Image (cartoon, rainbow, N blue to C red):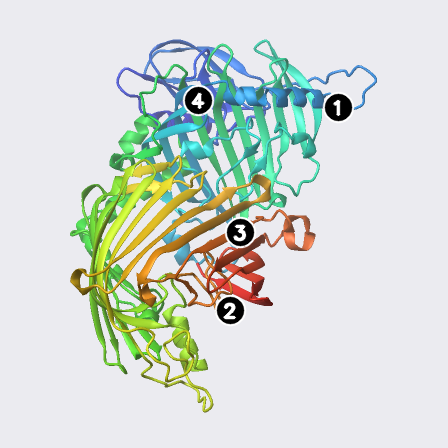
Amino acid sequence: MIKSLIVFFAVILAKPVFGQSVLAGRVTDSQGNAAAFTSVYINGTTQGTSANPNGYYSLKLKPGKYVINYRFVGFKQQTDEVEVTGNYNTHNVTLVYEDYQPKQNTPPVTEDAAFDIIRNAIKKRDYYLKEINAYSCDVYIRGTQKLISAPKGMLSRGVARQLQLNLSAKSILYMSESASHFNFEQPGNYKEVMVSSKATGNYNAFNFDRAANLQVNFYKNMLDIEGLNQRGFISPIADDALKYYTYKLLGSTTENGKVVNKIQVTPIDDREPVFKGNIYIVENDWRIYAAHLYVTGKSNLNFVDTLNINQQYLPVSADKWQPSSVSFTYSGNVLGFRYNGYILGTFSNYNLDTKFPPHFFNGETMRIADITVKRDSVYWSQNRPVPLTFDEQRIYNLKDSLVAAHSKPAYLDSAERANNKFSPLSYVFFGDTVKHRHKNEVITVNPLYDVVQYNPIEGWVVDLKPTYTKSMDVGKAYTISPELRYGFDNKIVSLNTGFNYRYDPEHEGAFYGKVGTGILDLNNEGTVGPFLNSFNALYFKSNDLKLYRSKFLMAGTQREVARGLLLDGNLEYARRTALQNQSSRTVRSFPDKEFNSNNPFITAVNAPLLFEENDALTLKLSGTYTFDEEYTTTPGGRVYDQSKYPKIKVNYRKGIKGIFSSDVDYDYADVQIYHDHINLGIYGFSAFQVTAGNFFNSNALSYPDYKWFKGNQGITFTPGISQFHFLPYYTYSQSSFLEAHYEHNFAGYLFNNIAGLRKLKLEEIIGGNFLTQKNTPNYGEIYVGVQRFFFRIDYGFVYRRGHIDQGIKLYFGI
């Protein structure tokens, strides 16, 4: 009776659209257990769906007779003929476990028969990877994560109530689902159009929200499962799979006239990024029929302890197969909070004859329209291909009722007032944000530790830098960012205002500018932060910042003019004035120590000014080209994907003499080649940057016009591919130079083989930096480091002017 009621509710939740009926039911095994994620599709077609975790399925069909296939890994495929008549039709199915009979090896036997099957599958791997030139299909993705248990006392009833959690039972932390139309063309072009998307709960959950990330293709040598680890996983039929796996033939069976071999996959070393489980290979065709594989924490996983993958293929034509579904089930434990979950992807309505128009694959990998996330519950009940479980439906009903209540103007106004309430403690560390939803306005104020500063050039400083942002339709927005700065010892008031108008978010089109007066760092690449410099000055009488004053007017614009080509240009007029120390106060007494001067090249207190006051009219132009650029289009603009290829950037800077009394006359240019993330598979990933530049004309220029580098002098540093570890802050070039950086993150490749370190999931890092130019010939650094989340420690050596030094650098931040 209970089962019948559950089937009934599963059916009525799948409301038919006009002219269609619903075929629904439950798929179980012979013991009555749910056959979760069973593929259900019409025989001879790719129209179908999957059962939910409780085995319930729902399929919308026109009235008539159908032959339905029910298939899941480890079970014998069942084919039933059903007749769909009225609005709702119930058809329950009991699957029978597949009986894989052992094969008899012909003596003499030197290795398991599975090895020959795998070798044949490896030979056909590349063929099956490329056999379909192009296709399109519909993809539905569902993900749910549940809290299983929490440490006693750490999850109070008040917190549980706010999160809608039941402490005595499994409670859903996160749910999401999406429907997309996916298009593919060799050799790797794809475009996904998201039709609908819905999510609720903790968005930091392990999950996929796009079909491209759910492409678990075992025909590839390496499988990258986003978020799971940095190294990827080796396919059981990769070209070099025999170096990592051993195989055993568990048996064979006949399915649809084809002999299917069940092969057990066992890693030679389970500390490598490898799978365990079973893979099913079709005899003679040597294609994958299905896969039931899993990975464990020994492979240095993030977020989860164990991940199971079930994938099934179906024929989309007479001799071509594609995935019909893929499901992930996983479990994890973070600080005693135990959770599990699943992610289900169904692929249906394959079309191998799709004719894509010219330039259809133009770099846009996904398009998300504004309507995508605004689909209501009626839309989802009519279009959801996989029924919700009872708990999922309960959570959605609860969330929908909360959304309805929280969408009322009175609640929104109350919530806005509460969120805009000033919090002194929060302001000290994070600043303050005020939002006005009716006007689409946001005002932010920098935190107190950034407002109050100290340095010997200005003394105590108050530096207020609020920003005002106004959002408009289709991602357009403008930002106004004024700054008011006052030094209590040098008595200088600085006031300036910046402006940015994003007029074309799809092509990064913007106008920007700035006008006023400001106190600037001599090194325009950046040096020490104001908070750390203030601390060092007050407690150690050490000042690293070298500042000057500028009165300026600047205007510029940028836009992507072609795929991958971003152009930027601005013109600035500035009057630059050197500054001297005006204060010597400290918290502690230093009778025998004085602050260094504001001249970085002369330490004496009475050092002369670094440069004479001058005027400069400067033209800056740059072009950045990304090879094979790819991006996601959202209502708010483009989000760029990580490119597989390096980027090239060309910078040109011209000091224009004589106009508006400009004193400068120079021409500077450089070329950068860089890549932030080069995937090297099981060996981790690398990043590099090489920059070569020169002053082709240096008739007249001042220190603010020189080429500066990202140096570092303290024990802390901020990771970045252009960051030196030991180079003095105020190292510059006024002639030709060559700068090179390289860093490699092994992502656990080495430490995962050391028992005592494996559980720490540390990432090993090596790198080097090089600079050669007139003032700093053949300067070099090498370093090694370890990293975990937001903490990193590096130990490095530096070679300069014939001497070798060494030291430790720390990073801790989010």
Label 1: few (<14), some (14–19) or many (≥20) C-alpha neighbours in 10 Å: some
Q: What is the C-alpha distance between the residues marked 2 and 1? A: 57 Å
x and y percentages locating residue 544 in the rendered image: 41, 73
Q: Is label 2 or label 1 in front?
A: 2
The structure residue drawn at horizontal position 47% and vertical position 68%, both measured from the top left corner, is 728
Amino acid type, residue under disc 2 in the picture: Ile
Q: 737 above or below 575?
A: above
Mark toward the start of the polypeptide (2 vs 3): 2
Marks counted in the figure total 4
Q: Kindly identify which residue carries mark 4.
A: 25
- Quarter the C terminus occupies: bottom left
In the picture, the disc for residue 112 is: 1
Q: Kindly identify which residue carries mark 3.
A: 743
Mark toward the start of the polypeptide (2 vs 1): 1
Q: Is residue 500 visible?
A: no
Rendered image quadrant of residue 605: bottom left
x and y percentages locating residue 46 in the rendered image: 43, 17
* Mark 1 element type: loop
Q: Is label 1 or label 4 in front?
A: 1
- Quarter the N terminus occupies: top left
Q: Nearer the viewer, residue 756 or 555?
A: 555
In the picture, the disc for residue 206 is: none
Q: Kindly identify which residue carries mark 2.
A: 715
Q: Nearer the viewer, residue 402 or 247?
A: 247
Amino acid type, residue under disc 4 in the picture: Gly
Mark toward the start of the polypeptide (4 vs 3): 4
